[in-house]
Each structure stands twice: as structure tokens, then as C-alpha cells.
Image (spheres, rainbow, N blue to C red):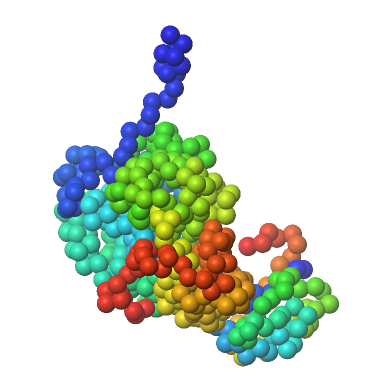
């Protein structure tokens, strides 16, 4: 399994929860919107990433799962 | 002797113009006039055993790419909805959002039947049962021309799939394909977050192909004359002809049809040549880039050649900036317009573009006091790639190219020195505030 993070910039309202819960990958810009350091989530951070996804008040953080065998859609 | 032999073996030069053949000066060509020039569109007879998607094969072989800006292969685009789930929908995009472009408006207002042929042929080729033609709702003259053309065609039985006219809001981002799809689905004409993309789930949730109106005109001619004919113009990698809109410091600004791969200098010459010394050329419109005039002059107009020098072909917009104009001030005005034209959806674009525009205006008009340049560079990084659509990326691209092409002016301005270019009236076209459509719905 491979995990990738995405932000829906339309629904994101800069609450900043994701950066709080997943500071290893997510930074905030001067206006409070998330900047992803990398979209690939290392295996040991998947649990934190899942917690960040469900904690986003506007559900703007998306974690895509794909198996290695399947091509990236 | 040798010369004659060589000449005889060369392929004949393609006959130009193609799209602009027989274009009336000041009115729309009627149906009779159109059919006399081009013949009936080969739509096939009912019960025809020839599979309609043969046209898709032919378009794939022709190498036609989208003429709306992105340059995506048209055949592949049609194929994607042919293979999709559900009956496809065809949308023609005639909502020309770029202030520097006039080609789509020219096609719609002078040769509406060529555009409509293209829509019908594309709709039949992918087996669509619905087709739309989107134009700006403020353009009442074009809407009237198209309404009349559609009525003529109904009588002649030319459109097997009914074509509906859709007047869409005139906002800059409203002509982006996902914005048109959302508007046709009764939403605001604003870009949407992808996936799903229109070819996966578009109008009424069905696979939707959105093509620029110029692209559809080329398709209508390829259906008649074939892919080999199409490839007689242009280069092997970028076949066919394309329309360009030339303005700025040239003798005869206007829309011209050229072979793909013609150098920028050739196009400027077609448009009457330079009327004063050129400093830089804006290629690709407000999503494009500033290129120093001497570099641009010999650059062939293809997506690949322009990408290789960090540029973009966009919808074929060429604006020549005189050497005595201030490229920085021109860029600042355009970025302020782009900041006003954000859909207001994505934070980094909503917050970033106005700040970027303010810093640029300061740098261009009041001088940077040595700290504005760094701030501009930082904001460019902050907005790029951070919207649902490419609006912030376009602005970032334009500013980055301005900083590079006008590098000397930039340091001059940041150091607080006056610039004589500011005394010249603004050159880059922007829509009149009074004539602007401010709504998205």
C-alpha cells in the first residue's frame, strides 16, 4: 500500500489542525493554509495522517491509498 | 538544372488560410455561403455502416491538439469519453477569457457554421446525445448570430444532435472547463476540485469532452479533407495551422492564421512588422511569459519549443512591448486584474494574489526601497500550485518571467530610481470595468 496526501484548497479554511497533528509533513503558510512537504506518507506516519484527516473541521485533507501494482489514477 | 529537380520533389506548400478561408469582413457567413465553400459536413447517413468513431481514429492520426491553451491531444480527449461509462456530452468552449485573444470571437461571429459543424461531427463521433456551445452571456451580438445560424441548420437538418447555446458569466476563471461544466450543472461558474475531471464525471454526471471552438473548426476540416491533408501544414511534431492574436507595437494588430512552428518574428512581420523598437514579447497571454524580443523572434510557435525556453503557447496570444515601455508596470496592472478575477475559493490564491499585486504595484510605481523584490519572489512561491485550478500558477509564471526578462529594470525599481517607461500609456489590454460581468451565476 502507498499513501498520498492531498488538500482540497476549495474546502480548506485554514483551521490548522492538520499541521498540529502531522507537523512532520505539514507546514502552514503565512495565512494559515497547509503546505505539504511531500505528498507521500511514510508507513510510520500513516496513523497520524489518518487522525489528521478525520480531525479536519472541513474535511479538506484527503489520504489516497493505492497498491503498488495499480497505476496512479 | 539540379535546382529544378530538387524543387519538384518537395511537397507542395499547404494552401493557407484554412479556417479563415473566405471569412467575410464584417458579417457572419450564412449557411449557403458556408456549404458552397466547404461542402456538407460528412456526418454519415442514418443506418450508415461506417462506424462514426472512425473520425476519432482520424483525429488521433492528425495530431491535432487543443487550441484553447493547454495543447492536449484532441484525439485522446475524444477517446477518453468514448471509453467512459455513460452517454457522453460534448461542450464547445467559445468563452474567450483572455483579454489579449480575439480568435474565438472572430470564428463565432464570422464563420459560425464551421464551429457548429465541428460540434456536430464531434458529437456524432463520440455518440453524444447532448451538445452545448458556451459563450459569454454579455456577448449579445455573438449570441444572436449563433441563434440565427442554428435556426438555418435546423431547417437543413444539419445537426443530428441538438446544440444548445449556453451564455456563461464573463469572469476570467469561468471559461476554465470545470467551471463551465459546473455552470451547466446549475452551479456557479467556478473551477472545481479534481478528480473527478469532466471526462470522468461532467455535465449531468456523464463523461464530458470540452473542446475549444477553434479546435472544433480544425476537426470539421479534418473530417472533410483527412489527417494527411492536415499534416501538410505545420511540423511533424506540431501539425496543422493555428490562429494567433497579435497586438502591441505592430503595424496591423489582429487575428492571423499561421502554420504551427512559424517563428514569432514571422508572425510579427505578418502583422505589419514592428512600429518601434521592441523590448520584450508576451507570448501566451496572461498565463504566458515575457520573452526578450531577440530570443522570441526566432522561437517557433509550438508548445514544445516554448516550453523549452520556459514559456507557454497558450491560446496563441502575442503582444509586442516597445523597448521604452515599463514591463514591470504592465505586469503589475495585469496581476492586479488577475487578483480581482480570482473565484474567491482557494485561500492561497484569494490571499496571495492581492498581496502579490500590491507589492508589484509598489515596486513598479513607487520603488521598492530594496525590500520589495524579495517579497515578490516569496509570494510567487507561495501561490504557485496551491489552487484548485491553474489561476495562481498562471500569475506566478507571468511574474517570474517578468522578473527574469526585465531583470535590469527590476533592480533599478527596487533601488528606488525613476523609470521613464511609466510615462507611456498602458499597453496590455484589460476589460473595461463598466463592461465587466462580476457575477459567477
The one of B17 and B205 positioned closer to us in this rendering: B17
Q: Residue B341: which quarter of the image?
A: bottom left
The one of A66 and B170 positioned closer to us in this rendering: B170
User: Does the image show residue B392?
Assistant: no
Labels in figure, total: 0
Q: Which residue is drawn at 35% across and 53% down?
A: B249
Q: Residue furthest right?
A: A44
Q: Where is residue B188 in the image (x, y as percent from the top left)?
A: 39, 78
Which quadrant does the C terminus of chain B fall into? bottom left
Left/right placement of residue A30 relative to residue B49 reads right
Which quadrant does the N terminus of chain B fall into? top left
Q: Which residue is drawn at 21% across and 67% down?
A: B140
Q: Which residue lies furthest to the top in this view?
A: B1
The one of B80 and A11 positioned closer to us in this rendering: A11
Q: Tell me: residue B275, above or below residue B360.
A: above
Q: Residue A37: which quarter of the image?
A: bottom right
Q: Which residue is drawn at 30% across and 51% down?
A: B254
Q: Where is residue B10 in the image (x, y as percent from the top left)?
A: 44, 22
User: Does the image show residue B282?
Assistant: yes
Q: Tell me: residue B302, above or below residue B139.
A: above
Q: Residue at x 74, y 81 (%)?
A: A49
Q: Tell me: residue A51, above or below residue B219.
A: below
Q: Position of residue B82 (x, y in %)?
A: 47, 54
Q: Position of residue B320 (x, y in %)?
A: 40, 54
Amino acid at each position: 500500500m502507498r499513501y498520498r496526501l492531498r488538500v482540497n484548497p476549495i474546502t480548506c479554511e485554514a483551521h490548522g489542525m492538520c499541521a498540529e497533528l502531522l507537523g512532520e509533513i505539514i507546514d502552514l503558510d503565512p495565512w494559515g493554509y497547509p503546505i505539504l512537504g511531500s505528498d507521500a506518507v511514510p508507513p510510520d506516519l500513516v496513523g497520524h495522517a489518518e487522525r489528521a484527516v478525520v480531525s479536519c473541521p472541513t474535511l479538506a485533507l484527503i489520504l489516497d491509498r493505492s497498491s503498488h501494482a495499480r497505476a496512479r489514477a | 538544372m539540379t535546382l529544378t529537380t530538387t524543387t519538384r520533389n518537395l511537397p507542395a506548400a499547404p494552401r493557407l488560410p484554412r479556417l479563415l478561408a473566405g471569412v467575410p469582413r464584417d458579417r457572419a457567413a450564412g449557411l449557403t455561403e458556408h456549404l458552397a465553400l466547404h461542402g456538407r459536413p460528412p456526418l454519415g447517413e442514418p443506418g450508415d455502416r461506417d462506424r462514426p468513431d472512425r473520425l476519432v481514429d482520424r483525429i488521433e492520426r492528425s495530431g491535432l491538439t487543443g487550441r484553447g491553451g493547454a495543447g492536449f491531444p484532441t484525439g485522446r480527449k475524444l477517446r477518453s469519453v468514448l471509453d467512459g461509462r455513460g452517454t457522453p456530452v460534448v461542450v464547445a468552449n467559445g468563452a474567450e477569457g483572455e483579454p489579449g485573444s480575439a480568435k474565438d470571437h472572430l470564428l463565432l461571429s464570422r464563420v459560425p457554421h464551421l464551429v457548429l459543424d465541428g460540434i456536430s461531427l464531434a458529437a456524432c463521433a463520440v455518440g453524444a446525445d447532448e451538445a452545448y456551445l458556451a459563450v459569454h452571456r454579455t456577448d449579445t451580438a455573438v449570441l444572436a448570430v449563433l441563434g440565427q445560424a442554428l435556426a438555418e441548420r435546423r431547417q437543413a437538418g444539419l445537426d443530428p444532435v441538438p446544440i444548445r447555446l449556453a451564455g456563461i458569466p464573463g469572469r476570467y476563471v469561468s471559461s476554465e472547463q470545470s467551471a463551465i461544466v459546473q455552470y451547466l450543472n446549475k452551479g456557479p461558474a467556478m473551477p472545481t476540485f479534481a478528480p473527478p475531471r469532466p471526462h470522468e464525471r461532467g455535465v449531468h454526471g456523464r463523461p464530458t469532452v470540452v473542446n475549444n471552438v477553434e479546435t472544433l473548426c480544425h476537426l470539421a476540416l479534418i473530417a472533410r479533407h483527412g489527417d494527411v491533408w492536415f499534416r501538410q501544414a505545420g511540423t511533424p511534431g506540431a501539425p496543422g495551422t493555428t490562429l494567433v492574436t497579435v497586438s502591441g507595437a505592430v503595424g496591423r494588430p489582429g487575428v492571423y492564421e499561421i502554420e504551427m512552428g512559424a517563428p514569432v518574428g514571422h508572425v510579427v512581420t505578418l502583422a505589419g512588422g514592428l512600429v518601434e523598437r521592441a523590448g520584450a514579447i508576451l507570448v501566451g497571454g496572461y498565463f504566458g511569459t515575457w520573452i526578450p524580443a531577440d530570443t522570441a523572434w526566432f522561437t517557433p510557435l509550438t508548445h514544445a519549443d516554448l516550453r523549452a525556453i520556459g514559456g507557454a503557447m497558450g491560446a496563441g496570444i502575442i503582444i509586442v512591448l516597445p523597448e521604452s515601455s515599463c514591463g514591470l508596470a504592465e505586469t503589475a496592472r495585469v496581476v492586479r486584474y488577475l487578483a480581482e478575477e480570482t473565484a474567491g475559493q482557494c485561500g492561497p490564491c484569494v490571499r496571495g494574489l492581492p498581496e502579490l499585486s500590491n507589492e508589484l504595484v509598489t515596486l513598479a510605481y513607487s520603488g521598492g526601497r530594496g525590500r520589495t523584490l524579495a517579497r515578490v519572489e516569496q509570494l510567487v512561491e507561495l501561490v504557485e500550485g496551491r489552487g484548485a485550478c491553474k489561476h495562481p500558477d498562471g500569475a506566478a509564471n507571468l511574474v517570474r518571467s517578468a522578473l527574469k526578462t526585465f531583470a535590469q529594470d527590476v533592480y533599478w525599481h527596487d533601488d528606488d530610481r525613476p523609470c521613464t517607461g511609466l510615462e507611456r500609456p498602458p499597453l496590455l489590454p484589460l476589460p473595461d470595468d463598466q463592461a465587466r460581468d462580476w457575477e459567477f451565476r
